[in-house]
Amino acid sequence: MTVATAKETRGFETEVKQLLHLMIHALYSNKEIFLRELISNASDAADKLRFEAISNPDLYEGDTELAIHIEYDKEAKTITIRDNGIGMSREEVITNLGTIAKSGTQEFLRSLTGDQVKDRHLIGQFGVGFYSSFIVADKVTVLTRRAGLSPELGVRWESQAEGDYTIETIEKDKRGTDVILHLKSQEEDFLNGLRLRHIVTKYSDHINIPVMMVVEDFTQADEQKKESSPKEEVVNRASALWTVPKSEIDDEAYCEFYKHVAHDFEDPLVWAHNKVEGKLEYTTLLYIPARAPFDLWQANKPRGLKLYVKRVFIMDDAEQFLPNYLRFVRGVIDSNDLPLNISREILQSNKTVDSMRASIIKRVLTMLTDLAKENNEKYLTFWREFGQVLKEGPAEDFANRETIAKLLRFSSTHADSETQDVSLDDYISRMKEGQDKIYYIAADTFNAAKHSPHLEIFRERGVEVLLLHDRIDEWLMSHLPEYEKKHFQSVAIGSLEDLEFAKDKGSEAETDKEKSDFEHEKETFKDTLSRIKDALKDKVKDVRLTARLTSSPSCIVADEGQMSSQMQRLMRSAGQLVSAQPILELNPHHLLVQRLSHENDQESFHDLSQILLDQAILAEGGQLDDPATFVRKFNELLLHVAKKGNGKDD
């Protein structure tokens, strides 16, 4: 190597400084992962070289034998991980080692609690990568050159994780990257061939590239080792895990391969390994993570499976094989039926891809269905992390809508628990005789749904109602009209004439009397309802009596075919102009409503009518146009009642 040129010192991005500090202190109990991460990066570099060399074989520079080499030097107290993969240019070094090119970084950092044990899991979700080097090293040196660049365009990068790094141009004869770790004094026990071999076989046995180390005779003394032949041997299995028969792979190997593919810290929740033979030949190894990544909701985040063709890496995020609602799935697909030079554009309009996509979707949904049947507790863990994403499914995937619906989970009035653990099959199994609809209420929060006045008659008659409180739920229900031939019905839309099935079985005379009484109440309140409608003018579409309320004086409902109040609020929050008047329903047995029917003072009548409407809007989680006026009028009503109670008002 020649004398270094163009040397400069640069500062890390703020996020890198924070992440380095947190990793060094939070991952203290699993220091071995530094080697896993560096081997994984080296493997990715080899994969990328293979892919780019498909169209440009000169990138191999005459060396097609790809490998990762691990060396250690007890005297210098260093460990070196060297690969002959794609390497990096100066610009790529600055981008990849000086910044964190990952969406959601700020959100991730804000989520950290300061509790080392909890933060360890969070950091694992985010991915540790190259920066894990500083868990064991107080200085890291990187020597690299991108394939295809001339030897004098090599790069040397060095940092002690103290806020800055140096970068300079050097001469590097061979392409690829050397990562040299200068170990901390308390980490010198890693300078041991047996231990390094154990870490490689534990974490990286599945890497589809040989990991090489110098042959050592561990029966000899250290002095004799130095005189040993410098021949190298392969430490790992060095074969693609998905090509190995399932009977020869244990759970630990599957989990470690997942961590390599997903750059995750935790074991996956569940996985499926399948080989398809017939008209199409391909192998899939699919994983469901145990936790949602921080960038799950980032719109521009690259997603998809690692795509291989005939075991040659093609691309990291082949999103064409899975729909967006399954974007949490990780894994690989290896096809024998796609050309090696396939591009993203060709993938988007390829019949073979379409066939494989349909099969992979069914495989993922089957994996989740089996998990729900065999281990409900594990499935609920999945649901807590990815349930809202899966709810996008019925709108995106009409062909599998029924299967997706079977996987959905909700809160309900059956247990009144915020935990979403009620399946639609559970609900149907508890439906009353004669019930032909699945009832639900949607609100901004669980408590708003649970305490909605619309539920009063349902609770009284023991009819279960699903409590929907995720923002996506109204959108979900607009794309899920029925399940198992049972139509969904919002309890906040339309009338309740079809609740006859839920009544106690009384005599025909009792039923007739109940209907007759309600018709009499309608006639009695006819003039009052007309006066209320005039008082509220263009604020309501109609005013009517209802049997759905048992303790509340009023509620608002949407007319049949009209958007619910919750959907209207969501549309407004998204910037859509929505102006739909609700229907005000009144409980004829409530004292406030009865008092209103006897109120002769026009101003008091108007104020009380407005209070009943505003109360109903608030109970729905809505916002008032004039909150101050509502408070004033409500206070006046309270004062009037108080005075009457003290005998100061007749």
Image: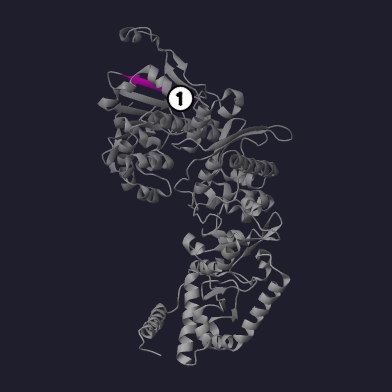
At which x and y percent is residue 203? Answer: 45, 27
Q: What is the residue that sits farthest to the bottom in this orientation? A: 601
At which x and y percent is residue 581? Answer: 56, 78
Work out whether 601 lies above or below 407.
Answer: below
- Magenta stretch mostly in which secondary structure? strand
At which x and y percent is residue 331? Answer: 55, 37
- SS category of the residue bearing label 1: helix
> Is residue 79 in view from this perspective?
yes
Q: Residue at x 41, y 45 (%)?
A: 101
Colour pattern = one colour
Quadrant of the snapshot with the N terminus? top left
Q: How many labels, in total?
A: 1
The one of 396 and 473 positioned closer to us in this rendering: 473
Mark 1 highlights which residue? 202
Quadrant in which residue 483 is drawn: bottom right
> Is residue 308 in view from this perspective?
no
Quadrant in which residue 432 is drawn: bottom right
Direction from residue 643 to residue 381 in the image, left or right: right
Q: Residue at x 42, y 18 (%)?
A: 213
At which x and y percent is residue 614? Answer: 47, 77
Work out whether 131 lies above or below 497.
Answer: above
Q: Residue at x 63, y 47 (%)?
A: 348
**Tag 1: residue type?**
Lys
Q: Is residue 69 magenta?
A: yes
Q: Which residues are magenta?
A: 66-73
Q: Residue at x 56, y 72 (%)?
A: 549
